[in-house]
Image (cartoon, rainbow, N blue to C red):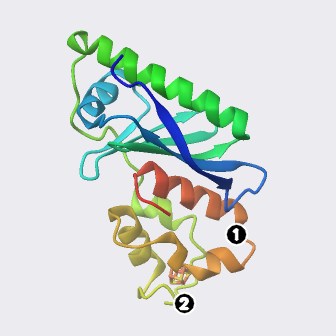
């Protein structure tokens, strides 16, 4: 088997929705070489080759794969976490098995825009994040040069749903929130 094990290393409640859990897990081997093949085989993934990372969804769950680990947001509970691990392990091993029949794709199919991210920010232009405007913050968040946690109003005000979307964007791009 290409990938033997995925071991959970960390699990705790999601920041934006405490009824769900997020977790991290470690792969028993480096799987970076398989990313372009998963990207070629599955339509709805975001492949960021600069990191490299590959993000896919399982219904509302967001699953980001790195070379040697994965990070998942919005799992239902620990049982769900183990089911997600089996699901991902199957995708990786099946992709490797059929690799010769898949056209690898080395590019990102689509990614969110700065305007899209901006629409979920508080739009206060308060500069508390260190940027002059919220749109500048959105651009840097998109390129991985800013951290969502620097926008303190997002965490202080009544922005729970927007915070959830911003955290989804950040994870989908393969950046840690
Ligand atoms: S801290 Fe948040 S609300 Fe304030 S300028 Fe930065 S992005 Fe905008």
Is 3 in front, or is 153?
3
Horizontal side, residue 96 vs residue 133: left or right: left
Instruction: Name the foreground residue: 115 vs 18.
Output: 18
Which of 19 and 154 lies nearest the eye of the viewer? 19
Q: Quadrant of residue 113?
A: bottom left
The residue carrying mark 2 has its beta carbon less than 8 Å from ligand 1:
yes
Question: Measured along the vertical axis of the image, is residue 135 above or below residue 130?
Answer: above
Which residue has dot 1 on it?
159
Q: Secondary structure at mark 2?
A: loop
Using residue 129 as the reference point, say whether residue 78 is left or right of it.
right
Give neighbour class at mark 1: few <14, some 14-19, many 20+ (Cα, 10 Å): some
Task: Return the x and y of residue 71 as percentages of the image width and height.
Answer: 50, 47
- Residue 39 lies, with reference to residue 158, above or below; the image says above
Find out whether the residues at labels 1 and 2 contact each other: C-beta distance under 8 Å.
Answer: no
User: Taking 155 as reference, is 91 left or right?
Assistant: left
Q: Which residue is mark 2?
A: 126
Q: Residue at x 67, y 56 (%)?
A: 14
């Amino acid at each position: 088997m290409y990938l033997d094990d995925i071991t959970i290393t960390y699990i705790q409640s999601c920041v934006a929705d405490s009824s769900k859990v997020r977790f991290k897990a470690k792969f028993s081997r480096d799987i970076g070489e398989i990313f372009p093949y998963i990207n070629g085989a599955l339509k709805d993934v975001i492949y960021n080759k600069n990191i490299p990372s590959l993000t896919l969804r399982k219904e509302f769950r967001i699953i980001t794969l790195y070379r040697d680990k994965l990070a998942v947001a919005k799992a239902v509970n620990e049982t769900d976490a183990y089911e997600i691990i089996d699901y991902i392990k199957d995708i990786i091993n099946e992709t490797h098995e059929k690799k010769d029949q898949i056209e690898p794709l080395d590019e990102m199919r689509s990614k969110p825009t700065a305007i899209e991210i901006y629409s979920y920010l508080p739009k206060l232009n308060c500069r508390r994040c260190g940027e002059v405007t919220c749109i500048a913050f959105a651009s840097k968040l998109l390129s991985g040069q800013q951290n969502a946690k620097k926008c303190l109003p997002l965490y202080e005000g009544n922005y729970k749903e927007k915070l959830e979307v911003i955290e989804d964007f950040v994870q989908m791009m393969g950046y840690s929130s």
